């Protein structure tokens, strides 16, 4: 019997495992970097062990320290979560060698799937359908488009789509460099890129007694940077025949490597309905809650049971209903998906949905880890109901802090193409990102008006109203893709606001403003954090794509004239580390508009910094390995 579990991970998945352990009466041990010393997973564990340092390479990726922590804390089992060392066969073996139970598949099974190239060879022998690899030295125009992929790791790192043969060699080098930096293994391979393909996967669960469950399918086609954004179970629109093919292939894959525990077999389904093996994830997936919701199972509890040697039932339970999950990220989709940092002041969702989060109110979102704040999961008897429930919960959420992808998620779930299962594919955001991230400046203006009125009330001894006529008040906010200057008068005869002829003030307070807008009563809740203002409102009837929240920055009346930079300056958009400079690039070089100059790594992603225009590189004050803060000068390109 397992009595104490150390989770060799952090954030959301650590909290998720701890929740099940508490229900089963199992004590919990957390590990943490210095950056995570006050994190929720640390506070919730029965015991915590410090891993000195901040970077993952010094902490969560140090298998020796993790094993030592488990033994020091008296744990008798280790759960790896996902990411970090969860698919590291050497770590799994080290845990077992230390006399601890490994809550995962055997090291040999992990090793068999660790390299995507070796995994494809094994799957071919097992009769699992897959895409034939392409020899990059013999590739022709007829082979395009191609996909360059890292043999190790995942999460979209070391992955490139190639549309032109001339670009293949450069992309191979770039993908190899990124893979080496991310996984310590620069091996890459090339295969056909399936345009319009769907990402469909099968959840498996296998015990040590010969039973393998295939727990339905999931669709994870909505992706950015080859990383999943919205997932659902079961995958909609698949024929009975295709579902059977996927289940059989997944079971053959599991049996071929003597699998045990929870895992996922991922497939690419083309427009003709043919399925091809992509890879096998030898761990619990981020999106496992949608399968749990549909099958009414606790996959973590089953992982623990299998690790204790217990058998599964002969057949799994029958599925029921539909579940959809959205990943809430601290990122700006309109700015190249740039991760965002800062204090998360508030994260609250209405009842009726499941929230799996690694952060709580007041936590700091830093640069060391993935920008995912939470997963929001909705279940309902049908797909349409589940999608509606999830979209409604997201738009009613209160999320105060860094910029997030919340509006993108709501608009994605309500997009006509998402409503049609036959139209789903991995190119969704390539086609629709612009429309999904376009700001409605006019719609945001009334939110800015509410912010200005609440601010006036807070500053006035008389509750915002004036007994005598006065000049107009003015307040300027930036946000929602525009600058909003609000000019208004507040008197005993009510509100008079420029550019808002149809607006009438009903109620005014420091935190709440009620306006009548074109005959509709609208209630705005205003929250301030320094010069940042978050304004929330209920959904607008008849306008399902209209944001229900806007964030503004109050602008000073007299801007600092010295807060300027030299024309052509490229400033760091986020804190991070310069990982490499373009090969051979030096000051004085002529560069073209859009030419890559350097790469910045932050929150487990690489961000390409490009020349804003053609000109001369007159300054390059950074070097690989240098850590930078937001606004640090990276380069200057002079026209």
Image (spheres, rainbow, N blue to C red):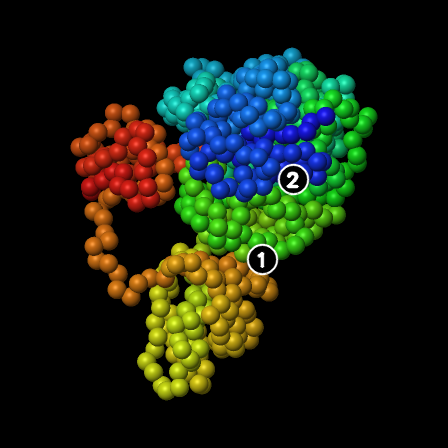
Give the image quarter of residue 470.
bottom left
Identified at 56% across, 73% down, the residue is 521
Question: Up-down: is 328 above or below 9?
Answer: below
Q: Is residue 619 left or right of residue 61?
A: left
* Nearer-N-terminus badge (2/1): 2
Across and down, in percent, residue 215 comes to: 72, 32
The residue tagged 2 is 19
Label 2 – label 1 distance at C-alpha: 26 Å
Across and down, in percent, residue 373 comes to: 52, 44
Label 1 element class? loop
Question: Up-down: is 505 above or below 408?
Answer: below
The residue tagged 1 is 396
Label 2 element class? helix
Q: Is residue 625 left or right of residue 279?
A: left
How packed mark 1 is, by other alpha carbons closer than 10 Å (few <14, some 14-19, many 20 or more), is: some
* The N terminus, quarter of image: top right
Q: Nearer the viewer, residue 60 or 219?
A: 60
**Residue 554 seen in render:** yes
Check if mark 2's residue and mark 1's residue have beta carbons within 8 Å.
no
* The C terminus, quarter of image: top left
Identified at 62% across, 55% down, the residue is 350
**Residue 171 seen in render:** no
Q: Is residue 466 left or right of residue 634?
A: right
Question: Up-down: is 232 above or below 399?
Answer: above
How packed mark 2 is, by other alpha carbons closer than 10 Å (few <14, some 14-19, many 20 or more), is: some
Per the rendering, the mark at residue 485 is none
């Amino acid at each position: 019997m397992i009595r104490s579990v150390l989770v060799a991970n952090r954030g959301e998945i650590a909290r998720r495992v701890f929740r099940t352990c508490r229900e089963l009466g199992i004590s919990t041990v957390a590990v943490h970097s210095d950056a995570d010393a006050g994190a929720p997973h640390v506070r919730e564990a029965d015991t915590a062990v410090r891993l000195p340092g901040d970077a993952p390479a010094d902490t969560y990726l140090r298998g020796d320290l993790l094993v030592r922590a488990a033994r020091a804390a008296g744990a008798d089992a280790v759960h790896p979560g996902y990411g970090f060392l969860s698919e590291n066969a050497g770590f799994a073996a080290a845990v077992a060698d230390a006399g601890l139970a490994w809550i995962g598949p055997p090291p040999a099974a992990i090793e068999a799937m660790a390299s995507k190239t070796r995994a494809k060879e094994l799957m071919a022998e097992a009769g699992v359908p897959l895409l034939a690899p392409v020899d990059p030295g013999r590739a022709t125009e007829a082979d395009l488009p191609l996909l360059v992929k890292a043999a190790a790791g995942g999460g979209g790192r070391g992955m490139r789509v190639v549309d032109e043969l001339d670009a293949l060699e450069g992309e191979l080098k770039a993908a190899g460099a990124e893979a080496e930096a991310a996984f310590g293994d620069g091996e890459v391979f090339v295969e056909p890129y399936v345009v319009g393909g769907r990402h469909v996967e099968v959840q498996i669960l296998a015990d040590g007694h010969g039973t393998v469950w295939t727990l339905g399918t999931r669709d994870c086609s909505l992706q950015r940077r080859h990383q999943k954004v919205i997932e659902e179970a079961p995958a909609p629109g698949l024929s009975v025949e295709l579902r059977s093919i996927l289940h059989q292939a997944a079971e053959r894959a599991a049996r071929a490597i003597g699998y045990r525990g929870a895992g996922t077999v991922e497939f690419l389904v083309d427009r003709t309905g043919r399925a091809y093996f992509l890879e096998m994830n030898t761990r619990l997936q981020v999106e496992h809650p949608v399968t749990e919701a549909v099958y009414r199972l606790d996959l973590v509890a089953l992982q623990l049971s299998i690790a204790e040697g217990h058998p599964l039932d002969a057949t799994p339970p029958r599925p029921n209903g539909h579940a959809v999950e959205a990943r809430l990220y601290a990122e700006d989709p309109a700015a190249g998906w740039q991760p965002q940092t800062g204090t998360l002041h508030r994260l609250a969702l209405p009842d009726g949905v499941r929230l799996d989060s690694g952060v709580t109110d007041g936590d700091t979102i830093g640069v060391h880890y993935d920008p995912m704040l939470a997963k929001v999961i909705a279940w309902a008897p049908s797909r349409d109901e589940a999608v509606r429930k999830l979209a409604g919960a997201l738009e009613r959420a209160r999320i105060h802090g860094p910029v997030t992808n919340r509006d993108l998620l709501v608009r994605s779930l309500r997009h006509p193409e998402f409503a049609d299962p036959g139209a789903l594919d991995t190119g969704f955001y390539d086609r629709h990102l612009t429309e999904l991230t376009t700001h409605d400046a006019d719609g945001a203006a009334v939110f800015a008006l509410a912010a200005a009125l609440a601010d006036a009330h807070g500053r006035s001894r008389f509750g915002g109203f004036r007994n005598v006529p006065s000049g107009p008040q003015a307040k300027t906010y930036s946000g929602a893709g525009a600058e909003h200057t609000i000019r208004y008068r507040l008197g005993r005869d009510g509100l008079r606001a420029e550019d808002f002829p149809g607006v009438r003030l009903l109620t005014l307070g420091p935190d709440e403003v009620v306006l009548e807008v074109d005959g509709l009563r609208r209630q705005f809740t205003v929250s301030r954090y320094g010069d940042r203002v978050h304004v929330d409102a209920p959904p607008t009837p008849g306008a399902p794509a209209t944001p229900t929240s806007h964030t503004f920055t109050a602008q000073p009346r007299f801007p600092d004239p010295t807060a300027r930079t030299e024309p052509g300056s490229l400033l760091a958009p986020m804190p991070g580390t310069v990982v490499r400079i373009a090969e051979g690039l030096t000051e004085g070089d002529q560069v073209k508009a859009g030419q890559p100059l350097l790469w910045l790594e932050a929150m487990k992603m690489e961000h390409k910094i490009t020349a804003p225009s053609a000109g001369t590189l007159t300054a390059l004050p950074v070097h690989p390995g240098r850590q930078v803060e937001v606004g640090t000068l990276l380069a200057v390109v002079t026209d």
